[in-house]
RNA sequence: GCCGAAAUGGUGGAACAGGUAGACACAAGGGACUUAAAAUCCCUUGUCCGUAAGGACGUGCGGGUUCGAUUCCCGCUUUCGGCACCA
């Protein structure tokens, strides 16, 4: 048995930090701006399942980084809190009648306890939870500012509706078009909703990405989501109708090839363009489309559907009469909800044209037969009147000028980004602080009356009308108009979970402020967030919404930066091993036996299984519980293992055997203390290893390359095991290097070495560059690029000498004997390559 | 289908301004200690041929550039993540 008493050590130091408020931070004005850092974790939703091993990954990374920064003289803000409004607590309430607040607060207590057990250096005095009245008061306040700026509006939009449960469903609750709970086919129901005009900020959200220190892939995802495109809108006259059909296209150059048009089933002109003969078919088709979820529309992509409206439009450039179709491959939410179809040069249009026998006309010289497949590359225009002979980009320019001069179209910018549906028909969320007055219209709740608190309800069950359970409480709904004092009704929609997480990073700055969401001084002192770490699943929505709110707050003069999160790092997912049968189905871990090393069989059948990597899931029984890991190996081992597994940014599989290796490393460190510290000079060799270690750990920790920093510390420990005695001159700097990684153990070692706590406030060790350089290097001698000899030479030996020494090698002589030397390459301090022939 | 990321020993991963592939760790094998086991310490360990010295092959696959490619270029395959058929 080992004698590394992690349990005792970890309890001792966690109590010490708590008692001494070691990590409480203040806005000390004497610290210059460039010595202040705000390091933020994505706060968790406190689920009933407790902490998952994925949470500590990012939290450990930021904790190591923060402790490293403090030791390097920075004033570091590192807070934690809870994103505590959310669906699971409400669903649990519907099932059991337990108040979501009770469930949530119990879960928060559990989460906090679990997080604390990992020894993170949070300033807990700044903890916030989004469901508290003191917090959501300011969420409501921000909503009112959005409303007053015209950035919130009402509109009828569809929700997923389960006709059996009589309730709206989130996308997550819809599985394969069916209600997750009862299996009923989900339909769409139009409902009055509050919508935020995020599209008004589309350009700024796109432009300002350029100023951020985020990975290119995340920036690309956000940029694609915003989806700015420059094209043209074109008006097509409709035969026998007053109205024109407006389409948006990025390929106005292909207008001569437009052989039909398509409008989406939800398009406002559908009724008008449908001729009496087609009415039945069109209505049936629209009915079908309304039944389909977005998912089904997507899945049916391979097989295009549609129906002819009976009407025709006139192609404005060649006067051709072209049919107008109705099809759900055109979305009402993008562009104008109508397109001109150019089957020769667009794959989707080509598929549709083939299915319904519509003409395909080539207008760009194609390298394929457009009757056989679409040609979507560039080419020289043909069959295109005044565009003939031009390439794509020139033709687009020419056509757009033509359209504008004739006033039948104009250059238009379009975004994929849609406005943000901001209301939920739920109980457990921030009430939207608006009042509907029959005479004054929609009136905001006066700011001095915030927070507008959630009333207690008897039943959390849905109202049955699609509205929130709040509609069932007349005492709450019936109110007086803040303007005229007459009878009025409260808004019963609540806000989505995103709302609270849009600005929590600001509340940490000044969590107890009763007058404003955070003081100007605190914002000025800390913002922007220097490093934000969290899972890639929030790459688009959360980050885009938070950026949007931040920009609105900037326009209001409340925050001092255009962007909230200067640097963003997404941690990879922690996956698990799973076992797969030959038919690719997975087997739960407890059904598997390891018959021989790396040979796995299914217990029930004896079938040989392949080990694969899969997400942790309850059904596969491969979920790792952090509490159990901490109990068995300690928090320091858990932290170190999660960082040692691989690079922070990539996903990696959990292997408890790997954890035991890290545990062994910590145990080896502990057992070094069995020797007395010696004040003797350490050997030159050991000193060099130490300085190389300081250099590498310093560089790697700053770059969040924790896995390689840990390897280097392992190398130093291995060296110490080969040395007699434990020189203080090595040991003490090493404890300091360890401190961010294994904070509990490091505190204990620091105390054992005769120092007063806390090691976390000690300065980071410095290295001497000359001690990190070897004066003898191993020179590689290659013949035709293959290593044939190695020799030790002094660093800095000149090229000619290196070549002479290489040639003198017996092995090299053997290889080049009788051959012609064509060329020699000498890379000083690295290698010699002799190129021969014959 | 589109977008993004990736592919290196039995396993997790190192090394990329082009220069010794496999650091560190796990697993496996051998040895020491022990009455024994566990724990611990030491050694071996990419594959193949060879007693050895040594040699051949080797970073998903096929080409290319180069004295030299895990690293750069072209074309594929597979896996993972995201998605709103985005005109």
Image (tube, coloured by chain):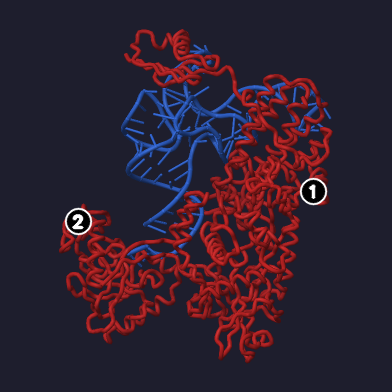
Chain colours: A red, B blue
Image side of residue B75 versus residue A75, left or right:
left
Q: A419 or A399: which is nearer to us? A: A399
Q: Chain of mark 1?
A: A
Residue at the disc numbered 1: A17
Element under label 1? helix
Q: Which label belongs to residue A390?
A: 2
Determine crowd level at label 2: few under 14, some 14-19, many 20+ residues with C-alpha closer than 10 A: some
Element under label 2? loop
Using the image, determine if residue A264 lies above or below residue A567.
Answer: below
* Residue depicted at x 56% and y 83%: A442
Picture quarter with the N terminus of chain A? top right
Q: In x, y percent, where is residue A240? A: 23, 84
Q: Chain of mark 2?
A: A
Q: A826 or A564: which is nearer to us? A: A564
Residue A49 seen by the camera? no
Determine crowd level at label 1: few under 14, some 14-19, many 20+ residues with C-alpha closer than 10 A: some
* Residue depicted at x 77% and y 25%: A726
Q: In x, y percent, where is residue A287? A: 40, 80
Q: How many marks?
A: 2
Image side of residue A330 versus residue A710, left or right:
left
Image side of residue A415 versus residue A635, left or right:
left
Which of marks 2 and 1 precedes in the sequence?
1
* Residue depicted at x 68% and y 52%: A78
Q: In x, y percent, where is residue A623? A: 64, 53
């Amino acid at each position: 048995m080992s004698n590394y008493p992690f349990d005792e050590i970890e309890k001792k130091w966690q109590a010490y930090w708590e008692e001494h408020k070691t990590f409480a931070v203040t806005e000390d004005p004497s610290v210059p701006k460039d010595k202040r850092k705000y390091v933020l974790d994505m706060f968790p939703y406190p689920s009933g399942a407790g902490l998952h091993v994925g949470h500590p990954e990012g939290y450990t990374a930021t904790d190591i980084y923060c402790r490293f920064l403090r030791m390097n003289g920075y004033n570091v803000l590192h807070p934690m809190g809870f994103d505590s409004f959310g669906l699971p607590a409400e669903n649990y309430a519907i099932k059991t009648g337990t108040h979501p607040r009770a469930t949530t607060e119990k879960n928060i207590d559990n989460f906090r306890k679990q997080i604390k057990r990992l020894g993170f250096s949070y300033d807990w005095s700044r903890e916030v939870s989004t469901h508290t009245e003191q917090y959501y008061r300011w969420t409501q306040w921000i909503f009112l500012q959005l409303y007053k700026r015209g950035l919130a509006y009402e509109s009828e939009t569809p929700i997923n509706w389960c006709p059996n449960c009589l309730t709206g469903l989130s996308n997550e609750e819809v599985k394969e078009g069916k209600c997750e709970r009862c299996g009923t086919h989900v339909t769409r129901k139009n409902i009055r909703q509050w919508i935020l005009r995020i599209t008004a900020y589309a350009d700024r959200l796109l432009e300002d990405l350029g100023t951020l220190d985020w990975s290119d892939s995340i920036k690309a995802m956000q940029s694609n989501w915003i989806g700015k495109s420059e094209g043209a809108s074109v008006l097509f006259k409709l035969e026998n109708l007053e109205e024109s059909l407006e389409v948006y296209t990025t390929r106005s150059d292909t207008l001569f090839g437009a052989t039909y048009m398509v409008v989406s089933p939800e398009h406002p002109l559908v009724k008008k363009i449908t001729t009496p003969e087609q009415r039945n078919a069109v209505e049936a088709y629209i009915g079908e489309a309304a039944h389909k979820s977005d998912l089904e529309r997507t899945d049916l992509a391979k097989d295009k559907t549609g129906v002819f409206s009976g009407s025709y439009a006139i192609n404005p450039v060649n006067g051709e009469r072209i049919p107008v179709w109705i099809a759900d491959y055109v979305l009402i939410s993008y562009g104008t909800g109508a397109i001109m179809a150019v089957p020769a040069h667009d794959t989707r249009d080509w598929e549709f044209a083939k299915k319904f026998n519509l003409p395909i006309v080539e207008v760009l010289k194609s390298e394929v037969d457009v009757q056989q497949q679409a040609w979507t590359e560039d080419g020289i225009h043909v069959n295109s009147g005044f565009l003939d002979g031009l390439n794509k980009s020139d033709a687009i320019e020419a056509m757009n000028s033509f359209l504008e001069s004739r006033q039948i179209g104009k250059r238009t910018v379009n975004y994929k980004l849609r406005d943000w549906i901001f209301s939920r028909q739920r109980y457990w969320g921030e009430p939207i602080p608006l009042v509907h007055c029959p005479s004054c219209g929609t009136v905001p709740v006066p700011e001095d009356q915030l927070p507008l608190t959630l009333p207690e309800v008897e039943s959390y069950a849905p109202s049955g009308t699609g509205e929130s359970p709040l509609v069932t409480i007349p005492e709450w709904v019936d109110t007086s108009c803040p303007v005229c004092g007459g009878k009025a009704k409260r808004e019963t929609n609540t806000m989505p979970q995103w709302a609270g997480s849009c600005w929590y990073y600001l509340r940490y700055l000044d969590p107890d402020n009763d007058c404003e969401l955070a003081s100007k001084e605190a914002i000025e002192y800390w913002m922007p967030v220097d490093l934000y770490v969290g899972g890639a699943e929030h790459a688009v929505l959360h980050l885009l919404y938070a950026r949007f709110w931040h920009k609105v707050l900037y326009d209001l003069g409340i925050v001092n930066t255009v962007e909230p999160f200067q640097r963003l790092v997404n941690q990879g997912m922690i996956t698990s091993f799973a076992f797969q049968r030959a038919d690719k189905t997975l087997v739960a871990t407890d059904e598997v036996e390891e018959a021989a090393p790396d040979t796995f069989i299914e217990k029930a059948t004896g079938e040989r299984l392949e080990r694969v990597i899969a997400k942790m899931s309850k059904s596969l029984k491969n979920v790792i519980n952090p509490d159990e890991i901490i109990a068995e190996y300690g928090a320091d081992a858990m932290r170190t293992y999660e960082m040692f597994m691989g690079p922070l940014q990539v996903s990696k599989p959990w292997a408890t055997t790997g954890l035991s290796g890290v545990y062994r490393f910590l145990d080896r460190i502990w057992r070094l203390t069995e020797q007395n510290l010696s004040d003797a000079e350490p050997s030159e060799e050991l000193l060099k290893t130490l300085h190389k270690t300081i250099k590498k750990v310093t560089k790697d920790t700053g770059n969040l390359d924790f896995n390689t920093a840990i390897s280097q510390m392992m190398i130093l420990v291995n060296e110490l095991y080969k040395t007699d005695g434990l020189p203080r001159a090595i040991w003490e700097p090493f404890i300091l290097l360890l401190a961010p990684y294994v904070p509990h153990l490091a505190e204990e070692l620091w105390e054992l070495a005769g120092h007063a706590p806390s090691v976390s406030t000690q300065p980071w060790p410095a290295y001497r560059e000359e001690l990190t350089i070897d004066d003898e290097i191993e020179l590689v001698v290659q013949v035709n690029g293959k290593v044939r000899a190695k020799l030790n030479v002094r660093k800095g030996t000149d090229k000619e000498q290196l070549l002479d020494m290489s040639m003198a090698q017996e092995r090299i002589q053997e290889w080049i004997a009788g051959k012609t030397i064509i060329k020699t390459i000498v890379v000083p301090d690295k290698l010699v390559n002799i190129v021969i022939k014959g």
